[in-house]
Image (cartoon, rainbow, N blue to C red):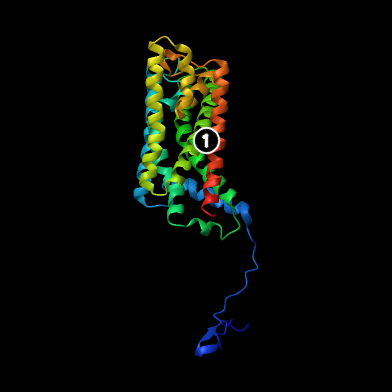
Amino acid sequence: MSPEPTPPTTYASPAQGGASIHNIGYRHYDGPRLGRAYARRSLFSQSLRGAYGLGRSAKSKVLPMLLFAVMCLPAAIMVAVTVVTKAGSLPVGYTRYAVYLQAVIGLYLAAQAPQSVSRDLRFKTVPLYFSRPIERGDYVASKFAAMASALFILTAAPLLVLYVGALLAKLDFLDQTKGFAQGLVCVALLSLLFAGIGLVISALTPRRGFGVAAVIAVLTIPYGAVSAVQGIAFVQGNESAVGWLGLFSPITLIDGVQSTFLGGTSSFPNGLAPTTAAGFVYLLVTLLVIAGSYALLMRRYRKAGL
């Protein structure tokens, strides 16, 4: 029978001034080191879960789950109406659903983007991430991907409800599948665009309350201004200007892309869609804003000395 293991012996070594250094039995770690990839995945998972309140207090789950339900409820109602009335199509196209519910998406982003990054900056906890094998680019990429994924879940879930409901209503399978795929492309682009804008604003305003207000302002004020000016231009007969004015608001950027390339109808006055040339400009500006947001995030954390 083997003898029982004995705990490490503690002893003290003399030091100057009557002090002593105690050996409390710390041992060298020889196990596997999971590396940067594992750290990136862990940070992504933690940030994505946090965007829906998972792993946080019960109070933190209320708003994101409520907004998720609000996003899906209209889709369920539309499906019920389509099935009961035996309509030949869904009341709203897949690519336009997110445009109609932009206010809900904006509220979700305003609530969750600041909690994702601003608290780390305000309370100086970001250096704790970098005490492990992770670099600035890993942190920014993980946070950006997590916020975009959270928005994609929020916006794609109701499209899935519409798609399943359309198939239950026995609408044309190929048409619905094509529309569903186009809708997913639309909300993926919207998720990347909104995530970039929301995270940049939140990183520049470490106080969460200011971040919430700033995100709401950036999403709503330009949209209201663009819609008003588009209406004036249409009334005055300047229809060509209507399509170009949409370049100055995040949601109208997405509207211009989906109406030009994804088979959707435009929400611009009188349903005027951008020309093909203008549509390419919309797409280019959208991609530039996404890339620029990522670059600004990298610069923000570099400026913070991280």
> Residue 38's spot in the image, x, y percent?
60, 53
Residue 16 or residue 133, whichever sits in front: 16
Q: Dot 1 surroundings within 10 Å: few (below 14), some, or many (20 or more)?
A: many
Name which residue lies at 35% across and 44% down. 62
> Residue 286's spot in the image, x, y percent?
54, 29
> Residue 30's spot in the image, x, y percent?
65, 68
Q: Is residue 278 visible?
A: yes
Q: Quadrant of residue 110?
A: top left
- Considering the image in quadrants, where does the C terminus appear? bottom right
Task: Indicate whether 52 appears above or below 176.
Answer: below
Secondary structure at numbered mark 1: helix
Residue 297 or residue 165, whichever sits in front: 297
Task: Indicate whether 265 appears above or below 145.
Answer: above
Name which residue lies at 39% across and 20% down. 229
Residue reaching furthest to the top: 237
> Residue 40's spot in the image, x, y percent?
58, 50
Number of numbered markers: 1
- Considering the image in quadrants, where does the N terminus appear? bottom right
Q: Is residue 261 left or right of residue 72?
A: right
Residue 39 or residue 173, whichever sits in front: 39
Q: Is residue 52 visible?
A: no
Q: Is residue 217 left or right of residue 171?
A: left
Q: Quadrant of residue 89?
A: top left
Residue 56 or residue 285, whichever sits in front: 285
Q: Which residue is mark 1?
A: 192
- The amino acid type, in three-letter code, at marker 1 is Leu
Name which residue lies at 45% across and 28% down. 249
